[in-house]
C-alpha cells in the first residue's frame, strides 16, 4: 500500500527493530511523523536537537541497538552534530534522519537554508548522504543497519528532500539477511597461543570493544594481569585480584606495562584519552585485536595484529586455553600495592572528592548504569570506581563534549525501562542541556541526577595555574539548582552529609520521577 515516504521510513525502521525515536518535529520533517504511531514506534520529544542526539546515543549504549533521531532541515541537523561527533569518537551506532530542501542552487533565502547540509554532517559522521528517491532512502537505511552490525559502529546521517518525504511511495523491502561480521577463528589465534605459552607475566588491556562475559575466566585461567580503559571497566568484574583497573593514565602504568613479557590489547584504540602519553610503555611483544584496521596500524606498532571483534576473539581464546596452567609472574600483593599508590596519587591531585565518590558508590546498586559528564568528579571516579558489569558507565570520551550526561542518561533510562540508571554532572556542564530535565519529568523516569558544584570551572582554573596564566573566565553564576529542578516538576535534595546523600540516592532510584541531588565540596 502506497503511503508518503516519510511514513514508510518509520515502518521500515520498525521492521528493523527500532522501538524508540528521539527528536523534534517541524514543518520540514512533519511527514516523518505521519507513520510513527502506526508503525508502533515510541517517540520521545527532546527540548533541543542536541538533547535528541545525546538521548539516541545513550539509548544505543544501554540497549546495544542503534539509536535513531529525527530532526529538521538546517539548524535541527546542525544542533545534532555535537552528539553525532561524540558518537563517532566513542563508536556508538546512531542514525540521524533529517529533512532537507529540495533545491538550493538557484533558490536562495528559503527557510532553514544552508550551503551544504550533507557536507556538514559528513564532517562528524561515518558518512552523510542525501536520498533523492524512495529507493535511495531505503537503500541508505539498509546500508546503515548493515554497517552497524558488520563494521565499527559509528553514526550515519541521511537527509531526505521535503518533496520526497511527501510523495507517495511503495513500502520498503523486507530486511536483508545480515552479513556475518569478521570473527576470530581458532587458526587465527595460533600466534597468540604460542606467545602465551612462553609468557610468565602476560598482561591484557581490555577496551570498550572487548565485549565478552568470558574475560574474567580467561585472565583467571591464564594467571594474567589486566588493565581496562575507562570504557572497558567491568570486563573482569570489580574484584579480580590481578586487575590494575582503569589506571592507564597514571604515569606509573608505563613501568608496569614495561614489566610484562606479553601485552595483548583488545578492542581499544590506546588513544590519547586512554593513556595521556605517546607510548604505551611496552618493551616486549604487543598483540592488537580490533575490528578497525586503522587501529591495528597505529603508532604503537603491534607485532601481532588480528582484525576481529572482541567477542569472537574471547570465545576462541577461552576455548583454546581452557585448562591451561596459569602463569605465575604476577602477585596479588604487587597489584594491590600499586593500585593503592595510584589511588593516593589521584586523591592528592583532586583533594576532597574521593570520600564522596566512595560513599556514592556504596549507595548505588551494582547493576546501575551511570552516565557522566566532563567534570572533576567523574574524572576521578572513572579511575577509582570499579564496575561489576561491563558497559555500565558511559562518558563522553574522545570528543569530550559538555552537556552529555543528562540527555544520554534519559536515553539510557528509556532503554533500561526501570532498571537503575544515574547521571553525574558538573555544575557548569549541566547548564548545556539542563532543559532536558523536562523530558525526564514528562516520562516519569526514576533518575538520580547528581550535580557536583564546586562553583567554578575548576579543572580549567587549575590548568591555567599550572601554565602560569592568571585564571580568567572560570566562574559563572549558578542558579538555585534545587529550585530549578522543582520548577520543572522534579524532586530535589541538598544533603548536608554523606549519610544524607546516600539516603537521597537510594530513594531516587525508586521515585516516581527524576531527583536532582545537589552536592558541594562542603559535604565532606
Image (cartoon, rainbow, N blue to C red):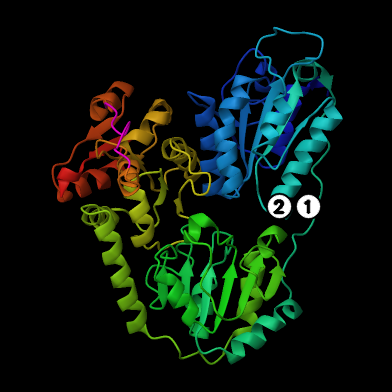
Q: Position of residue 455 (x, y in %)?
A: 24, 36
Numbered mark located on residue 149 in the image: 2
Q: Viewer-proximal residue, 171 or 87? A: 87
| Side of 49 where 40 appears, left or right | right
Is there CB contact under 8 Å for labels 2 and 1? yes
Q: Does residue 408 appear in the picture of this structure?
A: yes
- The vertical placement of 133 against 286, above or below, is above
Indicate the quadrant where residue 7 lies.
Answer: top right
Q: Position of residue 422 (x, y in %)?
A: 37, 45
Q: Does residue 390 appear in the picture of this structure?
A: no
Indicate the quadrant where residue 158 lies.
Answer: top right
Estimate the spatial distance between the alpha carbons at disc 2 and disc 1, rounded to whole Å: 8 Å
- Estimate how packed mark 1 is, as few (under 14), some (14 to 19) or many (20 or more) residues with alpha carbons within 10 Å: few
Which residue was labeled with disc 1?
178
Q: Position of residue 43 (x, y in %)?
A: 56, 28
Residue at 66 percent of width and 9 percent of height: 111
Q: Viewer-proximal residue, 407 or 374? A: 374
Q: Which span of residues is magenta-colored?
A: 469-477
Amino acid at each position: 500500500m502506497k503511503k508518503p515516504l516519510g511514513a514508510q521510513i518509520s515502518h521500515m525502521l520498525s521492521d528493523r527493530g527500532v522501538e524508540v525515536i528521539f527528536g523534534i518535529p517541524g514543518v520540514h520533517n512533519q511527514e516523518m511523523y505521519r507513520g510513527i504511531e502506526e508503525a508502533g514506534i515510541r517517540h520521545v520529544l527532546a527540548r533541543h536537537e542536541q538533547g535528541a542526539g545525546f538521548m539516541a546515543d545513550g539509548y544505543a549504549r544501554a540497549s546495544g541497538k542503534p539509536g535513531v533521531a529525527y530532526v529538521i532541515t538546517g539548524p535541527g541537523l546542525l544542533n545534532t552534530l555535537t552528539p553525532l561527533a561524540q558518537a563517532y569518537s566513542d563508536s556508538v551506532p546512531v542514525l540521524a534522519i533529517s529533512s532537507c530542501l529540495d533545491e538550493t542552487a538557484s533558490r536562495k533565502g528559503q527557510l532553514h537554508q544552508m550551503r551544504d547540509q550533507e557536507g556538514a554532517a559528513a564532517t562528524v559522521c561515518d558518512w552523510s548522504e542525501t536520498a533523492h528517491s524512495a529507493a535511495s532512502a531505503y537503500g541508505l537505511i539498509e546500508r546503515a543497519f548493515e554497517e552497524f552490525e558488520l563494521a565499527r559502529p559509528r553514526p550515519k546521517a541521511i537527509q531526505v528532500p521535503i518533496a520526497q518525504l511527501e510523495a507517495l511511495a511503495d513500502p520498503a523491502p523486507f530486511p536483508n539477511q545480515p552479513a556475518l561480521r569478521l570473527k576470530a577463528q581458532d587458526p587465527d589465534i595460533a600466534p597468540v597461543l604460542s606467545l602465551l605459552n612462553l609468557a610468565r607475566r602476560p598482561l591484557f588491556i581490555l577496551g570498550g570493544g572487548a565485549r565478552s562475559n568470558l574475560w574474567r575466566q580467561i585472565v583467571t585461567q591464564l594467571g594474567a594481569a589486566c588493565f581496562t580503559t575507562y570504557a572497558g571497566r567491568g570486563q573482569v568484574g570489580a574484584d579480580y585480584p590481578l586487575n590494575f583497573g582503569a589506571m592507564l593514565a597514571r604515569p606509573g602504568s608505563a613501568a608496569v606495562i614495561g614489566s610484562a613479557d606479553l601485552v595483548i590489547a583488545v578492542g581499544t584504540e590506546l588513544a590519547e584519552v586512554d593513556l595521556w602519553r605517546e607510548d604505551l610503555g611496552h618493551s616486549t611483544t604487543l598483540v592488537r585485536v580490533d575490528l578497525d584496521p586503522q587501529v591495528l596500524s597505529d603508532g604503537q606498532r603491534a607485532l601481532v595484529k588480528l582484525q576481529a571483534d572482541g567477542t569472537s576473539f574471547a570465545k576462541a581464546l577461552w576455548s583454546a586455553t581452557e585448562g591451561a596452567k596459569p602463569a605465575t609472574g604476577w602477585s596479588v600483593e604487587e597489584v594491590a600495592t600499586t593500585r593503592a599508590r595510584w589511588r593516593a596519587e589521584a586523591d592528592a591531585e583532586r583533594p576532597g572528592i574521593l570520600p564522596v565518590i566512595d560513599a556514592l558508590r556504596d549507595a548505588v546498586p551494582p547493576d546501575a548504569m551511570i552516565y557522566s559528564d566532563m567534570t572533576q568528579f567523574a574524572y576521578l571516579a572513572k579511575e577509582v570506581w570499579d564496575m561489576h558489569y561491563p558497559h555500565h558507565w558511559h562518558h563522553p570520551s574522545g570528543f569530550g563534549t559538555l552537556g552529555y550526561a543528562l540527555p544520554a542518561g534519559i536515553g539510557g533510562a528509556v532503554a533500561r525501562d526501570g532498571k537503575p540508571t544515574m547521571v553525574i554532572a558538573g555544575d557548569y556542564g549541566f547548564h548545556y542541556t539542563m532543559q532536558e530535565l523536562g523530558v525526564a519529568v514528562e516520562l516519569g523516569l526514576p533518575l538520580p541526577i547528581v550535580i557536583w558544584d564546586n562553583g567554578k570551572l575548576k579543572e580549567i582554573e587549575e590548568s591555567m595555574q599550572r601554565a602560569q596564566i592568571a585564571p580568567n573566565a572560570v566562574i559563572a553564576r549558578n542558579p538555585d539548582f534545587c529550585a530549578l529542578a522543582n520548577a520543572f516538576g522534579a524532586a530535589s535534595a541538598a544533603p548536608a552529609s554523606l549519610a544524607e546523600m546516600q539516603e537521597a540516592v537510594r530513594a531516587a532510584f525508586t521515585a516516581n520521577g527524576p531527583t536532582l541531588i545537589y552536592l558541594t565540596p562542603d559535604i565532606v
